[in-house]
């Protein structure tokens, strides 16, 4: 993504930087089930709900910063 991180700036600002793999596919089926059955409220993550047929609008809204994350419902 062509991002440069200045190690000296991190060091002297007392900021830590960590990274690692994000095994999303491992947790996604369970999390989707919890959202769809109402066991968890995704409101803190999803701020736009659209029907699945409007998936393109969801991506457009996120790209234009009108939404942080779109939830698509069947």
Image (cartoon, grey):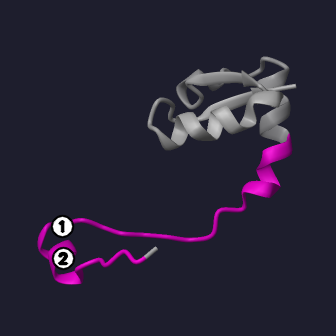
Q: Nearer the viewer, residue 35 or 1?
A: 1
Q: Quick one: which residue is furthest to the left in this view?
A: 12
For disc 1, the marked residue is 14
Residue 66's place in the image compared with 20, above or below, is above
What x and y, as percent, mark residue 38? 78, 17
Q: Is residue 36 left or right of residue 7?
A: right
Task: Please indicate whether residue 12 sits to the left or right of residue 41 in the image.
Answer: left
As displayed, is residue 54 above or below residue 19? above
In terms of secondary structure, where does tag 1 sit? loop
Which residue in the rendered view is the most extreme toward the top? 38
- Residue 40 showing in the rendered view: no
Residue 59 location in percent, x, y?
62, 41
What kind of element bears circle 2? helix
Residue 39 shows in this picture: yes
Tell me the tag on residue 68.
none
Query: What residue is pinned by disc 2?
Result: 11
Whether residue 58 sits left or right of residue 14 in the image: it is right
Mark 2 → mark 1, Cα distance in angstroms? 5 Å
Left or right: 49 in relation to 11: right
Write the residue at 80% across / 56% down: 25
Residue 15 magenta-drawn?
yes
Residue 11 in the image: above or below residue 25? below
Q: What is the span of residues highlighted in magenta in the rendered image? A: 2-29
Q: Image point 46% across, 38% down: which residue?
A: 64
- Image quarter of residue 46: top right
Q: Residues within 10 Å of mark 2 (few under 14, many from 20)?
A: few
Q: Position of residue 67 (x, y in %)?
A: 51, 31
Rendered residue at 72%/55% (across/down): 24
Picture residue at 31% right of the left edge, 78% below the top: 4
| Label pair 2/1, CB-CB below 8 angstroms | yes
């Amino acid at each position: 993504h062509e991002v440069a991180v200045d190690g000296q700036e991190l060091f002297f600002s007392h900021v830590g930087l960590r990274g690692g793999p994000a095994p999303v596919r491992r947790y996604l089926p369970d999390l989707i089930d919890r959202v769809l059955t109402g066991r968890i409220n995704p409101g803190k993550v999803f701020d736009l709900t659209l029907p699945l047929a409007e998936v393109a609008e969801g991506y457009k809204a996120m790209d234009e910063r009108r939404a942080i994350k779109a939830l698509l419902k069947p």
